[in-house]
Each structure stands twice: as structure tokens, then as C-alpha cells.
Image (cartoon, rainbow, N blue to C red):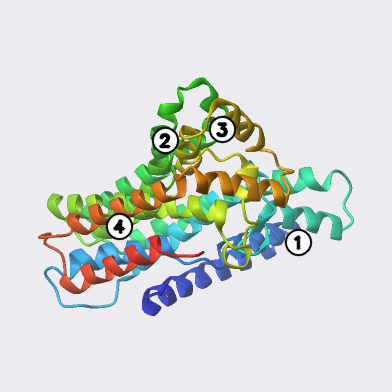
Amino acid sequence: MSPSPDAVEAVSQRLNIFHSAQARSAVELGPEAELVVRAGATAVDGGKRLRGRFCIAGWRAVEEASHAPCAPPSEVVAAAAALEVFHAAALVHDDVIDNSDTRRGRPAAHRALEASHRAQGWVGDAAAFGRSGAILLGDLLVAWSDDLFEEGLLDAAPDRANAARREYAKMRREVTIGQFLDIAEESAYATEPDERHAQRALRVASLKSARYSIQQPLLIGAALAGADEAQQAALAAFGHPVGMAFQLRDDVLGVFGDQAATGKPSGDDLREGKRTVLVAFARERLAPPARRIMDELIGDPDLDAAQIASLQRTILETGALDRVEDLIADYSRQAERALSGARLGNAAVGELRDLARAATVRTT
């Protein structure tokens, strides 16, 4: 992605201030508390700041429809930073659920805590400590996101603060349900007709990613700018298809991505058993014997490079990848149409379109 330096820098500075305050407060609680606070700061560090950038872009789209361009106020920057903290919480929990070893090219939080347990010479099962610690770390990050969000809303007008709270709460509910549907699908797919698998995978993509990653951050920012119903509707109609295209691109990278770029092993989604649209489309074109073989392989954490390569070939040969690319293009066109004629700032609309392209045409 080509980041907006002002937005990324503003969010990063706000996160640094918040993390410094948390580190100071942990000192009196002892070295173990300091360990988990440092782990929290590490979990938030890095990434594309996608959710924070869409939040600020949503605010700017509404604000610049009736006012001259200006820097986002403190409540918008705090909301954008809070979204990044909440995203880190989701990733920490997701890596525990998926038993992933890496995140952003470094050990996942539960693996890092496991290594700390060993380095300290503590007794007991280091791996169990890592998993338990990461669950609690994720919970701490959720609390931090609330703290940061509410701290920022102290500077907002009450009606705008309440509107932003409603959108934030909706995001939290939906992504949690989406995460559950994601893990449920790994078990439930076998009880559903094959022709329903793609639609069910799209339902997961909508709740787990599209609304949470793009649509709701846009609406939170717009709420803080005092958006009316028409402006909120236009941004929602834009944000959801962009979010769907973003998740489908993520699904493609989860199977075909380069580890050096994504920070995760190639084919990791296949080892984790993700029942994505890509997998659903491939299964639709396979004869029953080949479909059974595919089902036996997907979800095996010990898949070797040759087996991953075989599954990748199957996905390519069935045309599943081409169908997903077509779907990404369709969602991108929907998003483009959604902004036509909307009462939003012209320059901000251009920024939204640039962000959408960066989110859907990417290698990381």
C-alpha cells in the first residue's frame, strides 16, 4: 500500500503516547505485568494501519463536504488508534485459534510468550503458558482499545460521540460473531450442500472482515464528522464491497502469497483449514473422489511443500482463482459506483478510491 503519511504518523504518535502511559503504570505492578504490557505494544506495532486510515478518510469525506481541508481532530485520531489496538487484539486471538507460529514476519504473541517462559526458567508447560497468556493479552488489548476510544470521545460533541459509540459497538459484535462463524465453518461445511459453501464463506468474509476492516472504520470516522443518513449510506455502500474485495484478496494471499511479503508461510490457510470462497469454488468443479482428497488434506497442520503445491495446482486448474479474481473486480466496481453523486468532499473521495485500490490490489 501507499500510505498517507499524515494519517499513519498521527495514529502512530497517538499509539506511542498511549503505550508509554501503559508502560509507566505497569512498573509498580512488577516485571510480569511489564512483560504483558510490552507484548501488547509489540502486537500493535507494524501493519498497514488500514483501519485507522479508513476511519480518518471517513471523517475527511464528510468534513470536507462542507468545510475547508484540515488536520483530523484529537477524537478522530484517538478513534483511529483505538481501531488499530482492537485489530491487534483480534490478531492475537486469531493466532491462538489457528495455532499460527508467525505474524508480520515475527513470532505470534503466544509463541513469543512461550519463549519468554523458557527464557525466564519458569516451571510448567511453556506452550500452555503462551496460549493462556495470549488469550489474556488479547483481552487486555480490547480493554486498551476501549480506553483509548473513550479518552478521545471526551473531546467530541455528545451526539457525535454517541453515534461513533454505536458504530464501534456494532463492529465489535459483528467481528466476534464472524470469528466464531469462521471456526464453525471448518467443522460445519461437511453438513451443508456443496452449492451453499461459497455463500457461507462470503457470509464469514462479510462479518469477520468486510464490515470490521473497512465499512465500520469509515462509519466511525463519518459519525465523528456529523454525517447525515445519506452520507453514512454512501460510505457503507462503498465500504462493504471494498471490504469484501479486501478479504478475498487476503484469501488468495493465504494460499498463494509469498512468505517474504506476507510474513506467513505460503499455503498457511490450507494448513489451518480455512473454508474460503477459493476453496468452495475449487470443490464445486471437482469430481467426488478428488473432492474427498482435497477435504482430507485441507486442515492438516503437517502439510508439506509438495502437498501445498498440489492443492495450489488444483485450485488453479478448477478455475477457482480466476472466479475469485472476477469477484474481486465486481466488488471493486460496486464500490466505485457507490460514491457517484454522494455529498462528500471531492479530494477525500479521491483518497477513498486510492485506499480501496491499495486494499484490493496488493501482495501483503
243 vs 64, nearest the viewer: 243
Horizontal arrangement in the rendering, residue 155 relative to residue 11 (left or right): left
Q: Position of residue 133 (x, y in %)?
A: 70, 48
From the top left corner, tell me how far across and down residue 312 is, in percent: 58, 49
Do residues under tags 4 and 2 come within 8 Å of each other at their CB atoms? no
Disc 1 element? helix
The residue pinned by badge 4 equals: 218
Label 3 vs label 4, nearer the camera: 3
Image coords of residue 216 (percent x, y): 33, 51
Residue shown at 84%/43% (left/top)? 125
Residue identified by numbered label 2: 198
* Amino acid, disc 3: Glu
Read off the residue under disc 1. 31
- Give the mark, 3 or 4, whose residue is nearer the N terminus: 3
Evaluate if marks 3 and 2 touch, with contact meaning CB atoms under 8 Å apart.
no
Callout 3: helix, strand or loop?
helix
Relative to 29, is 9 on the left or the right?
Answer: left
Mark 3 and mark 4: Cα distance apart in space: 30 Å
Label 4: state its secondary structure: helix
Element under label 2? helix
Name the residue beneath numbered marker 3.
Answer: 186
Position of residue 157 measured from the top left corner of the image (x, y, whole percent): 23, 59
Q: Which of marks 3 and 2 is nearer the N terminus?
A: 3
Question: Is residue 158 among what the camera can see?
Answer: no
Depth check, front residue: 36 or 343: 343
Amino acid type, mark 1: Pro
- Residue at the image point whose x is 13% and y is 52% from the top: 230
Q: How crowded is mark 1: few (under 14 residues within 10 Å), some or many (20 or more)?
A: few
339 or 273, nearer to the observer = 273
